[in-house]
């Protein structure tokens, strides 16, 4: 039984009862998980043109090929020109999103040094949650030799359903995320 079926059979009814929602369709669920690496500083300051290393590492972490996002407009204070690479992004949906969150909670977060829980203040007004990691080397899919340049990683969990951050927090807690 995969993680999505387990979520639908066990977690969703328990969450419905916990939140006091009458209709099961009103319970918030995970719509997508966006995993991204900002590479704009490498392109502007260090004149790096080849992002193949980061692309391979993000592909190993997520199991999906990332897309290269380019700048839409120029910003002179950041030495950024229109069309310069800014970010590598992967959008995970359905079963892949739940599988990634399951691996993130059970394997990656225990590897974070001095982990005391995630911040409860990272919810936006729509109930989506963002997590920022200082270094993506903590993922077990990567070897020590794979990441020569330490880079941060941004994970955004987009929820579907009610836009209440308390309900979204209850959903993420039921999936295993630990908050401070």
Image (cartoon, grey):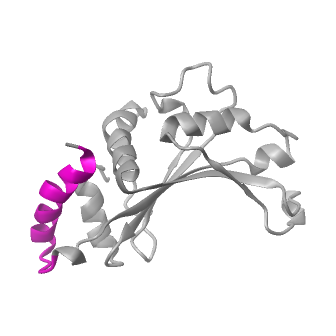
Tell me: 141 left or right of 21: right
Q: Nearer the viewer, residue 122 or 142?
A: 142
Say above or below: 152 vs 16.
Answer: above
Residue at image location 53% in from the left, 26% down from the top:
142
Q: Is residue 135 visible?
A: no
Image quadrant in which you'd find residue 80: bottom right
Tell me: 74 left or right of 151: right
Q: Is residue 82 visible?
A: yes
Question: Does residue 91 belong to the magenta stretch?
Answer: no
Residue at image location 36% in from the left, 47% down from the top:
101
Question: Does residue 7 belong to the magenta stretch?
Answer: yes
Residue at image location 85% in from the left, 66% down from the top:
75
Say above or below: 1 vs 31.
Answer: above
Residue at image location 76% in from the left, 51% down from the top:
40
Quadrant that contains the N terminus: top left
Residue 136 at what x, y percent from top left? 55, 36
Image quadrant in which you'd find residue 152: top right
Residue 3 at what x, y percent from top left? 25, 47
Residue 106 at what x, y percent from top left? 30, 37
State which region is magenta: 2-23
Tell me: 152 left or right of 73: left
Q: Main secondary structure of the magenta part?
A: helix
Tell me: 47 left or right of 170: right
Residue 162 at what x, y percent from top left? 31, 78
Q: How many marks?
A: 0
Q: Nearer the viewer, residue 134 or 73?
A: 73
């Amino acid at each position: 039984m995969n993680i999505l079926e387990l979520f639908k059979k066990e977690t969703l009814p328990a969450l419905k009862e916990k939140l006091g929602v009458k209709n099961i369709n009103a319970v918030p669920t995970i719509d997508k998980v966006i995993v991204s690496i900002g590479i704009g500083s490498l392109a502007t300051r260090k004149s790096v043109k080849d992002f193949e290393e980061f692309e391979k590492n993000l592909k190993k972490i997520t199991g999906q090929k990332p897309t290269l996002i380019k700048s839409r407009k120029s910003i002179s204070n950041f030495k950024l020109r229109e069309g310069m690479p800014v970010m590598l992004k992967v959008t995970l949906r359905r079963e892949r999103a739940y599988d990634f969150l399951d691996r993130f909670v059970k394997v990656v977060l225990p590897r974070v040094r001095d982990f005391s829980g995630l911040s409860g203040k990272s919810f936006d007004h729509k109930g989506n949650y963002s997590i920022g990691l200082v270094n993506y080397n903590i993922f077990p899919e990567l070897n020590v030799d794979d990441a020569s340049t330490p880079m941060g990683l941004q994970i955004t969990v987009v929820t579907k359903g009610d836009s209440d951050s308390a309900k979204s927090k209850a959903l993420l807690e039921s999936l295993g995320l630990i908050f401070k």
